[in-house]
Image (spheres, rainbow, N blue to C red):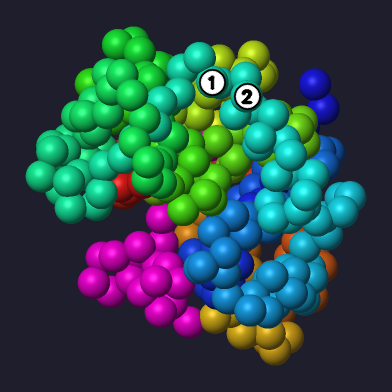
Amino acid sequence: MPYLGRFAPSPTGPLHFGSLVTAVASYLAARSQQGRWLVRIEDLDPPRVQQGASDLILRTLTTYGFEWDGEVVYQSSAKCQRAYTEALQQLMPYIYPCYCSRKQLQHTTKQGQFGTIYADTCRHLTSTLNKPAALRIKTPDQSFRFHDQIYGEYSQQLHADIGDFVIKRADGWWAYQLAVVVDDAIQGITHIVRGADLLDNTPRQLYLQQLLNYPRPQYTHIPLVLDQQGQKLSKQSYAPALALDVHTIHTNIFKALVFLKQSPPSTLIHESTQTLWDWAIKHWTVQLLTHDYSQPTRTVS
C-alpha cells in the first residue's frame, strides 16, 4: 500500500524541540517514500487543552516548512466522536464498568515493568452501581508482539504486564488507547512514527486493532529528547516553545537532523531551509538510529 503517515500533537501547549524531532522523523519517513503525511490534533482531553494551542501548533509547522496533505483532523470533531462510539459498540462483549476511585487503585494495583497493573477488582462484578464508572476492556492472557524499526522485536503479556485498561474514562472522555486506534484506521495510516514513550502502549493498541478487525500499521518509535536532568523534554516540564524567527528555524531543523543521526553536512547551515529539507528527504535513513539507541524511556500511560 502507498505510504501514509501522520503527526498527531496534543494541543496542551506549543511545540518544543522534542515535538520537532518527532515531526521531522515522521515527515521525512513519509516524504522519502513519496508518501502522504497527515496532521491530526489530538484534543481528546478538553480539561488539558490550552486555548489557542491548536492554531499555534499549525502555524509553527507551516513556518518550519512542513507541508501536510488533506485537511487537519480534530479528535473533538463530531465525526471522530461518532467513530469512537461505534467502535465502543463493537467492543461491548469485552467491556465492563470499573468503579474504582484513584485512592482504591493506589491500594489495589501493583507496580510492574510498564507501570501499574490493574487487579481485576471490578472484572467479576455481577451488578452495576449507581455512580460514574470508567469502562475497561478485558485483556487476554496472551502475548502481543510486533517489530519496531528501531528497537526490533517487542512484546508484552498483556494481562500480566498491563491488566485490563480503560477505554473510556469515568468523566465521560475517551481514553487515548481507543481513540488513536480508531483514528489511524479511519485515516488509513500505514506507518506510525512517534516517540519512544509510546512504545509500551503499542501492544494495547494491537489488541484493539485485532478486536475491531483493523489492519496493523508498521511502527517506528523515535528515541526521546531529554533535558539536563535526564527527563523527557515535554510541555509538562516547561520545555521552551520553538522559536519562529528564520535563523532559529533553520538551526532547529539542522539540530533535529543531528539528533536523528542523519549527519547533515555542515555546509547546509548556510543554505536555505528548503535546501535543507530537500537534502533531508533525499538522505533519510531510519536505520542510522538503531546504532546508538538500545532502550527507550518507559512511560506509565
What type is the residue that disc 2 sits on?
A: Gln
Taking depth in this image into account, of 57 and 288 the one nearest to the observer is 57
Residue underneath mark 1: 92
Residue 69 position in % (x across, y down): 86, 50
Residue at 42% x, 68% y: name it. 234
Task: State the residue at coordinates (46%, 17%).
Answer: 94
Instruction: Determine the residue located farthest toward the front in the rendered image.
Output: 130
Inter-mark Cα distance, 2 to 1: 5 Å
Residue 232 lies within the magenta run: yes
Q: Which residues are magenta?
A: 220-240
Q: How far from the left and from the top, in percent, is residue 126? A: 31, 19
User: Does dot 2 land on a helix, a strand or a loop?
Assistant: helix
In x, y percent, where is residue 24? Answer: 64, 57
The crowd level at tag 2 (other Cα within 10 Å; few <14, some 14-19, many 20+) is: few
Give the numbered dot on residue 89.
2
Which corner quadrant of the image does residue 160 belong to? top left
